[in-house]
Image (cartoon, rainbow, N blue to C red):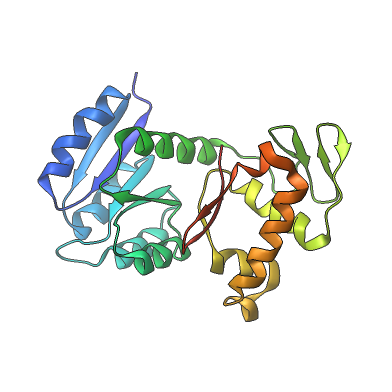
């Protein structure tokens, strides 16, 4: 049974040779593109369920491919990124990518990220509905942890709500700071770290372990 189409955009033949059978074995239909032009054409004509996008393409920069893709599609995009291109990973996430996986990557991790992105896409809860995660219940007005009220400041509540709405997704420092504090505070990373620390203390040892730091990039609430 096919669980969805995965468009793999990479100019390295070995990546396709490795991923195509692995994706097929996991129940996905792999689609292949080796250039940005091919990727955009296939994304428009086949409506894939998810895109794996390498940033280093021979014809169009991967960042530009992402921007053009976002002009007509909200398909989940996982960036395949080299380890030494951290700034590009951040830019891609800020431009609308849902996640990134560093090259070289472990297949198990990549498949887990794919499942998370597809699951998140399938969820159509209104933003105002209550969210539940590991004993935590949260809506726009209150927070409960294991049935007891969780005392959060207004900013802590907004921060946790943002993370829960993007469960499993990497949120960059810029994305979080813009959403919670506004565009004038996009560089206040130290300020954000303080709030993350406060939130972890209030969530307790088990749940705070799910709030992962992505060094130099941002934070993820891990499923």
Most foreground residue, 158 or 5: 158
Most foreground residue, 201 or 137: 201
Q: x, y (%) of residue 214?
A: 49, 55
Quadrant in which the N terminus appears = top left
Q: Residue at x 21, y 66 (%)?
A: 60
Residue furthest to the top in view is 1
Q: x, y (%) of residue 165?
A: 64, 47
Q: x, y (%) of residue 161?
A: 71, 51
Q: Residue at x 87, y 50 (%)?
A: 151
Q: Is residue 183 among the parts visible in the rendering? A: yes
Q: Is residue 179 among the parts visible in the rendering? A: no
Above or below for 137 versus 73 = above
Quadrant in which the C terminus appears = top right
Above or below for 137 versus 89 = above
Q: Is residue 129 left or right of residue 173?
A: right
Most foreground residue, 144 or 72: 144
Q: Residue at x 31, y 65 (%)?
A: 85
Q: Is residue 92 left or right of residue 107?
A: right
Q: x, y (%) of residue 70?
A: 41, 60
Numbered label tally: 0
Question: Residue 148's quadrant in the figure?
Answer: top right
Question: Residue 24's quadrant in the figure?
Answer: top left
């Amino acid at each position: 049974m096919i669980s969805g189409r995965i468009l793999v955009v990479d100019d390295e033949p070995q990546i396709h040779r490795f991923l195509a059978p692995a994706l097929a074995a996991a129940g996905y239909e792999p689609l292949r593109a080796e250039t940005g032009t091919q990727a955009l054409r296939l994304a428009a004509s086949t409506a894939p369920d998810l895109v794996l996008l390498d940033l280093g393409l021979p014809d169009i920069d991967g960042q530009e491919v992402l921007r053009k893709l976002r002009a007509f599609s909200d398909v989940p995009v996982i960036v395949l990124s080299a380890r030494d291109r951290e700034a590009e990973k951040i830019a891609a996430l800020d431009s609308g990518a849902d996640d990134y996986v560093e090259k070289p990557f472990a297949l198990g991790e990549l498949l887990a990220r794919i499942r998370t992105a597809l699951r998140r896409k399938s969820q159509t809860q209104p933003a105002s509905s209550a969210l539940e995660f590991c004993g935590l219940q949260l809506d726009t007005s209150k927070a409960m942890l294991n049935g007891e009220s969780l005392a959060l400041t207004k900013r802590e509540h907004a921060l946790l709500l943002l993370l829960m709405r993007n469960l499993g997704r990497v949120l960059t420092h810029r994305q979080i700071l813009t959403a919670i504090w506004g565009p004038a505070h996009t560089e206040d990373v130290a300020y954000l770290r303080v709030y993350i620390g406060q939130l972890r203390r209030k969530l307790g040892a088990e749940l705070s372990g799910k709030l992962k730091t992505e060094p130099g990039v941002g934070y993820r609430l891990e499923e």
